[in-house]
Amino acid sequence: MGITSALVLLAITWWLTFLMVLPFNVKTQGDAGAIEPGTHAGAPEVHNLPKKALITTGIAFVVWGIICAIILSEAISIT
């Protein structure tokens, strides 16, 4: 696996992990009871994006490391 392939795999892993972590611990405007006019009640009041980005980075590096180890050890062959 080349460097470019590893970076693309990391980017894909990071974004997939981010999309899975994003809905956790969201306080919506409906939960807070303060719905802004013109917005949906399910719109986030508190989203904690910086914290979620750090958590995503940690999880993504672990998952990426496992996937890279599997690829480099040739435990699974494509042919």
Image: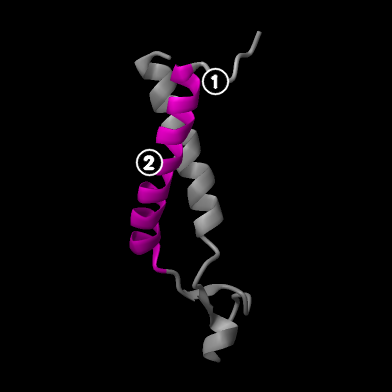
Kindly give the residue lying farthest to the right in the view shown.
79
Residue 61: give its label. 2
Tell me what residue is drawn at x 51 percent, y 16 percent. 74
The residue to which callout 1 is attached is 75
Query: Which span of residues is magenta-colored?
Result: 48-73
How far separated are the C-alphas under marks 2 and 1? 20 Å
Residue 15 in the image: x percent, y percent? 49, 43
The correct choice, above or below, for 78 with respect to 16 in the image is: above
From the viewer's perspective, is 21 left or right of 49? right
Q: Amino acid at mark 1?
A: Ala
Q: Residue furthest bottom?
A: 33
Q: Quadrant of the N terminus?
A: top left
Q: Residues within 10 Å of mark 2 (few under 14, many from 20)?
A: some
Task: Say what secondary structure mark 2 lies in.
Answer: helix
Element carrying mark 1:
loop
Residue 36, placed above or below residue 74: below
Name which residue lies at 37% across and 54% down: 53
- The quadrant of the rendering that contains the C terminus is top right
Q: Looking at the picture, how far across and down is residue 71, in whole percent?
A: 49, 21
Measured from the top left, where is residue 47 in percent x and y? Answer: 44, 69
Whether pointer 2 and pointer 1 mark residues with C-beta atoms closer than 8 Å, the reply is no
> Is residue 50 found left or right of 75 in the rendered image?
left
Q: Is residue 46 magenta?
A: no
On screen, residue 4 versus residue 43, left or right, reads left
